[in-house]
Amino acid sequence: MPRKPPARVRASQTRRSGSWSGRPIPRIPGASGALQAAVVRLENADDRFRPGDIAGAFHTWRRVVGGPASRARCYALHADCASCNPPGRDVLESASYRLPRRQAQELRRLTAPLDERFLQLTLPLPSKPPCPWWTLRC
Ligand SMILES: [Zn+2]
């Protein structure tokens, strides 16, 4: 697929900005230009995402693990309910499977310290059925 010129990318972001309408599209802190560009391409090409979803999820996940512990534990307890939690770790997981390999690795590298912090702040829930690891905490 040919690359869209930046002006067209920006125009389509404005048109499809969804929940971020009227606000600038968020960026993933620390992301390289290559990752940021791959994120924009994925969000424009894949109906599972809207512009800003992936960076928004990163900011959500960073806030969840930014303390206090009760916030992380509340997120963990309600990890399955969309009404309680804004999209967060699940969106990052989904994006990491759909980005090009190098950019997926970079996203996982940026997410790893947040995941580590989440594991420190929460306890395992061994009795739950098999599901994503971030839903098996309390
Ligand atoms: Zn809930």
Image (cartoon, rainbow, N blue to C red):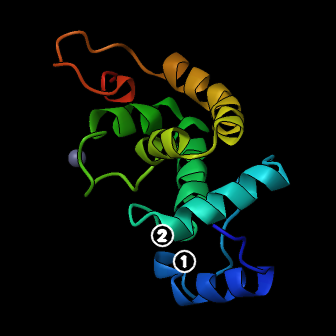
Amino acid under disc 2? Arg
Question: Is label 1 in a helix, a strand or a loop?
Answer: helix
Locate residue 134, reporting x and y percent. Answer: 39, 28
The answer to whether 85 is drawn above or below residue 106 in the figure is below
Task: Return the mark for residue 53.
Answer: none
Locate residue 115, reporting x and y percent. Answer: 56, 27
Q: Which residue is mark 1?
A: 20
C-beta proximity under 8 Å, tags 1 and 2: yes
Locate residue 73, reporting x and y percent. Answer: 39, 31
- Please count the marks in the image: 2
Q: Is residue 29 visible?
A: no
Task: Check the picture and name the quadrant holding the N terminus.
Answer: bottom right
In primary-sequence order, the first of circles 1 and 2 is: 1
The image quarter in which residue 44 lies? bottom right
Task: Check the picture and name the quadrant holding the C terminus.
Answer: top left
Q: Is residue 48 left or right of residue 64?
A: left
Q: Tell me the residue at 61%/38% (across/down).
A: 66
- Tell which residue pokes out farthest to the front in this image: 1
Q: Which residue is mark 2?
A: 50
| Disc 1 Cβ-to-ligand 1 distance below 8 Å | no
- Tell which residue pokes out farthest to the top in this image: 126
CA gap between label 1 and label 2 equals 9 Å
Q: Tell me the residue at 51%/83% (across/down).
A: 16
Q: Nearer the viewer, mark 1 or mark 2?
A: 2
Q: Tell me the residue at 47%/38% (across/down).
A: 93
The answer to whether 129 is drawn above or below residue 100 in the figure is above
